[in-house]
Image (cartoon, rainbow, N blue to C red):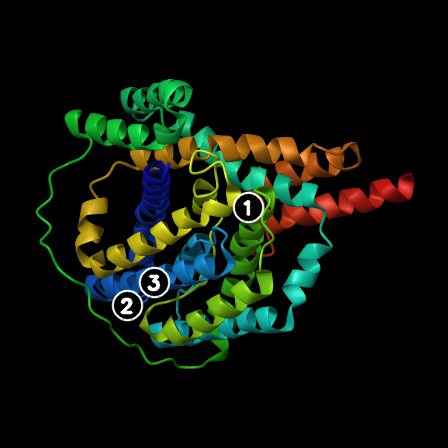
Amino acid sequence: MLVNRVLNSVIAGFVAVLIGFASTIALIYQTVINLGGDANLAASWLLVLGLSLGITSIGLSFFYRIPILIAWSTPGAALLISNAQGVSINEAIAGFMFSAVLILLCGVTGWFEKLMNKIPFQLATAMLGGVLVNFGIGVFNHMNEAPFLIFSMFMVYLVSKRFFPKYSMIFVLAVGVLVAWQTGLILPTNTQFTVAEFSYTAPELSLEGILSVGIPLFIVTMAAQNLPGIAVLKAHGYKAPVSATLTVTGATNLVTAPFGGYALNLAAITAAICMTEEIDKDPQKRYWAAMAGGVFYILMGFFSGYLIGVFSTFPSALIFALAGIALFTTISNSIQQSLSDTKYVEASMITFLVTASDLMMLGISSVLWGLIAGILTLFIMKKRE
């Protein structure tokens, strides 16, 4: 029914954006503070990010009729907190623009898409499983922190999945917020209602900004965000318009960088929430969920000043449990697909394990190392055969 389709799309889009905003606002806020900014500048960054993500998500999803959800780079924000020490905010802005130019070049030339077409589907889904599995495990890790809250959400998920599978996540969200409120985990806030404003920061090109911010941000965004984002689309049977998406996100990133649009990329974890069967049995109709997510991005961008205060009252256990539970189906599908061909089982297993690990070497995250390890395993095993 049309009503069910609309409702499921709105719910999925809202949950995806809620998780993305609530789990990363602290990182962006801390990045701005470390660079010498304040809360108003942080609100400006979230405003331009919300508008950028919303417009690109709606535009790309509608044009290609597939659920393309754009996100900011979460590992990129974490990278900036540690790597941008000693770099001025103007130099950091120039670094954002340098990274955006590199992403734009990848899209225009098609280099990245050609590389992705040579990577076996099984390794890509194994990498996706490795990225997501820690979110699934995190549901039960947070049970130590808030046992009653997590147990309630988990049981509601099982029961609603059995009897009302299309509405399982809204039940989980509603019960999670209710239990957190009743047990005192959500504290009252005196945050006043405000609308964020744009704040321009002039870029200042420097070698230190390029080496400390620009190049690392580009590598992390491509390896830890765009690569899993493409894998999510392929894992759900969609032909990813890689080059076109990189061109759009790179160009948008370049224009919005002086206002705080530090890195735009394909969403992976939150995008998966918009691609499940619970939204619509027809995969060609699920793009409405990503478009709904785009609308919520825009709304949250406008009210980011107020939301910074509101989201800070949500317990981390609630946010991470919501993310993990929403991804149970995608995790199981990724693992199943990665082991679907006996020729790739060992390479897929290595890819999965390395990606899921805490490996960080030469400034490169485990996501890229996992894919490298899987390709190396596949190459050596083929040579042996």
* Spatial separation of the CA atoms under disc 1 and disc 2: 36 Å
> Helix, strand, or loop for circle 3?
helix
Q: Amino acid at mark 2?
A: Gly
Q: Are marks 1 and 3 in contact (CB under 8 Å)?
A: no
Image disc number at residue 49: 3
Is residue 265 visible in the rendered image? The answer is no
Q: Residues within 10 Å of mark 2 (few under 14, many from 20)?
A: few
On the image, numbered disc 1 is attached to which residue? Answer: 232
* Spatial separation of the CA atoms under disc 1 and disc 3: 22 Å
Q: Amino acid at mark 3?
A: Leu
| Position of residue 347 measured from the top left corner of the image (x, y, whole percent) | 74, 39
Query: Image point 54% across, 56% down: which residue?
Result: 226
Is residue 255 visible in the rendered image? The answer is yes
Count all numbered tags in the image, as a single digit.
Answer: 3
Query: Image point 17% across, 54% down: which residue?
Result: 306
Image disc number at residue 36: 2
